[in-house]
Image (cartoon, rainbow, N blue to C red):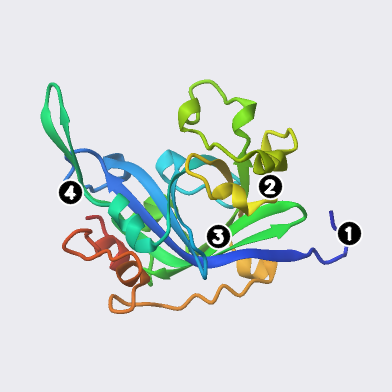
Amino acid sequence: MAEPGQERETVVLEEGDIFFLYRPRVEEEHPSSIGDVQRFEMVLRPHGGEKVRLLVVGRKRLPEAERHERHWGFVEAIRHSAKDIEKELRERRYDTGTRGERRQPAARPAGEGVYAITLEDGQMHLSYALELPEKPGEVQKAFRIAPEASYALSIKNPEKGKPVNAGLREEDEADYPEKLQEEFRGRRFAREDIRLLDFEGAEFILIGARSNPESEYGLDLGAEHENYKHAETIRRLRMVKSRHPVKPLLEGGWA
């Protein structure tokens, strides 16, 4: 820990593009509130990295930074390109024994920007700055996607059990190699090693920390206002509007 009056050291572990998305409930063609949403998700695309992560955030919204809320989440998918992640976000159809074929609509983009994962005093933080939409609307407010924010990020030890009625099933939890499992050092959470986030089934806790990370941590996230033509969601994730309605991303309204 830094001594009083001493500057804290912030180490940047990773930087990249961040995308916020939501997936409507089954058969919900026109969601109009968070009650019509099945999942709230984030995609982290590191600059120069070989892995792209699709994360599911619990409670269908980000934690409130000023109140230091904590929300659980997990890594749903790891892919080698943003294009492959987009395939995970398309419409899903499946058969049921009693209702026949059911349809879950494709995910909708709700925001994009830049992020950094930093290490400060032995604790990782996920900070981001929004680029689209230029002016957050009702969708962003519903999911608490602020113009910028920071969250303490801790990874759960799959060998330490879980609370009753919470977390993934044991068979769905991350299966870490022995050497990486040692990074937990017997603790319930690891707070320093970003590699633990690179496994499907990795569970994590986000705790609201700061609403102005650039000034608090001395970061320059380099966010720039974008438009449809230059939107990274369209270019990197191949989210064409014929498949994924982009109104929430560009205008902040439900679709």
Above or below — where is 48 with respect to 243? Answer: below
Residue pointed to by mark 3: 149
Q: Is residue 3 visible?
A: yes
Above or below — where is 102 with respect to 48? Answer: above
Q: Residue at x 24, y 63 (%)?
A: 247
Question: 166 or 31: nearer the eye?
Answer: 166
Residue pointed to by mark 4: 30
**Disc 2 vs disc 4: which is toward the camera?**
2
User: What is the C-alpha distance between the residues marked 4 and 3?
Assistant: 29 Å
Image mark for residue 4: 1
Amino acid residing under circle 3: Ala
**Disc 2 vs disc 1: which is toward the camera?**
2
Picture coordinates of residue 177, whole percent (x, y): 61, 40
Picture coordinates of residue 127, whole percent (x, y): 57, 61
User: What is the C-alpha distance between the residues marked 1 and 3?
Assistant: 25 Å
Question: 147 or 114: nearer the eye?
Answer: 114
User: What is the C-alpha distance between the residues marked 1 and 4?
Assistant: 53 Å
Picture coordinates of residue 113, whole percent (x, y): 45, 68
Secondary structure of the residue carrying numbered label 1: loop
Amino acid residing under circle 2: Arg
